[in-house]
Image: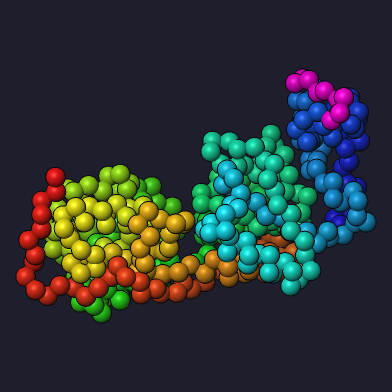
Amino acid sequence: MSNGRKRTTQSDVARLAGVSPAVVSAVIRGKGSHNIRVGDDTRLRVLEAMKQLNYVPDVVAQTLAGGKRRIIGLFSFEPVFPKEQNDFFRPFLLGVEKAAEANGYDLMLFTSVPVSGGRKRIYQQGINRLGLADGVILLGRNPPIDDLVRLEDEGFPFVYIGRKDAPDRTLSYVAADYRRATLEVIEHLHQLGHRRIAYLGEPQPIERHRDREAGYSNALQQGLVEANAEFRLRLAASDITDDVVSELLERSISAVVVEDIEQAEALYAQLANRGIAVPTDFSIGLLGEPDAPSQLNLDWSGFTIPREEMGYQAFISLLARLERKIAHSATQITLPCSFRTGATVGPERVTATPTYQSGV
């Protein structure tokens, strides 16, 4: 979509920096080209010229005659883009691919951005390489929020897979309804006779964790958990020790809902050390599904995240922003999860409390 302005070119950058267009091209690629070697001073001069001219590299647009390119970008903040067949992110990508095929768009995978601080960043030295695409779908567990804010401020169309909040900003995303899904898990526990249910979460919660805990709060408000049995813990898996199990038993807790697979497995192992069987003596509900094959390979009770549908709807949401010219209008979509009965939740024991072996 043209805004009536003359597009800044590499030649413009080259003139301002006092170098050749070939040098500018080499700087953009981040390495020398054939016999071209770029010194640090020259490279910094070119980058400064690009900033002054607000130049965004767009090699695709140079080969097409204006207008939209019908290319949607895919960018993961993970250090290595998921490739395994059973990777947690794969269904998201399948959903995006299906939507792209159905709407006649190509997908561009951005993989060359360097890793900084254990995760990829969109902006490298002030340059946004995502401008090669009409818009972009972002995914990853914990993206740098300042990158998303800057994209939003620049009016660059994007949709993030997962709920993501920013101060004084409304960001576009497609997320799962973890609050309602958590409530459904606790409703199932309540139907099985559990009234004293604890919550175990990540030590540093972000949006998806807080949504789950909101479901636990809703369960308390609805009387699904006894008010005097409310118990919330935020611990790393390594901190789930025999003492934690002792405190749960002292409080007569009969079930725990857990945010993360590593925590769930750590709790399961500590219970097993005491001779406490899951789900015969104690129930564990996993608030989601394993990110990858887990060590115990159990059929966890909990819910399934609509990952493929989230990917599909993320593309459709982005397409709406592009084709309806509403790039500055954020869209937020929340999709329901599917309850999974599993094999780690059972009826509350109504017999006398069993004699447990003390932990060693």
Q: Specify the quadrant of the image occupied by residue 28.
A: top right
Residue 114 is situated, as x and y percent measured from the top left of the image, at 64, 37
Residue at x-position 36% and y-position 75%: 341
331 on left or right of 156: left
Image: 125 above or below 272: above
96 on left or right of 238: right
Residue 184 is situated, as x and y percent measured from the top left of the image, at 36, 74
Residue 268 is situated, as x and y percent measured from the top left of the image, at 27, 57
Image: 193 above or below 38: below
Residue at x-position 62% and y-position 61%: 93
Q: Is residue 5 visible?
A: no
Residue at x-position 55% and y-position 52%: 140
Residue 226 or 99: which is nearer the viewer? Answer: 99
Residue at x-position 80% and y-position 43%: 57
Image: 356 above or below 53: below
- The quarter of the rendered structure image containing the C terminus is top left
Residue 275 or 254: which is nearer the viewer? Answer: 275
What residue span does the magenta drawing correspond to? 33-41
Residue 304 is situated, as x and y percent measured from the top left of the image, at 45, 69
